[in-house]
Image: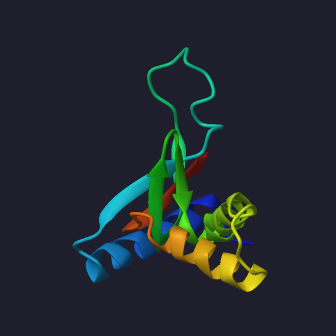
Amino acid sequence: MKTEMQIQKENVAKLLKLIAENPDLRVLPMVDSEIVADDGYNRWTAVFGSAQVDEVVSMGERIYIRSDDEEQLINEAYDKLYDDKLTDKEAEKKAESIVGSYEWEKVILVNINES
């Protein structure tokens, strides 16, 4: 079984590799809500989690991650097309087009996890 330190080293090594391979991409830390659940302190401890290249879009107070949320967004767009005079196939294609037209930004996501 890997130790926390071994996992941390592997995660940081992967992050550095992704940065070297994608120097023009913004690094976007994604902080676990468990880390900052209390406002009584100025600093919290955390560890580097996994890192990956993905796309994100910010809508209101939420950031959507394409690999995690695209299907949900397509379903929501599809549901809004209910009253349109479209076949299911046409509505599905239109919903995919709507979500595809969002201003997705390609980034390096870094999960920051509770230590």
Q: Nearer the viewer, residue 17 or 59?
A: 59
**Residue 10 in sight from this viewpoint:** no
Q: How many marks?
A: 0
**Residue 82 in sight from this viewpoint:** yes
Outermost residue to the top:
40
Q: Nearer the viewer, residue 102 or 104?
A: 102
> In the displayed structure, would residue 41 be above or below residue 20?
above
Left or right side of 55 for 46: right
Q: Quadrant of the C terminus?
A: top right
Percent position of residue 38, x then y: 61, 22
Image point (55%, 14%), residue name: 40
Left or right side of 16 for 37: right
Outermost residue to the left:
24
> In the displayed structure, would residue 111 be above or below residue 86?
above
Here the colouring is rainbow
Q: Quadrant of the N terminus?
A: bottom right
Left or right side of 55 for 76: right
> In the displayed structure, would residue 113 be above or below residue 55?
above
Percent position of residue 82, x then y: 75, 63
Percent position of residue 30, x then y: 50, 51
Percent position of residue 33, x then y: 62, 39
Image point (68%, 64%), residue name: 81
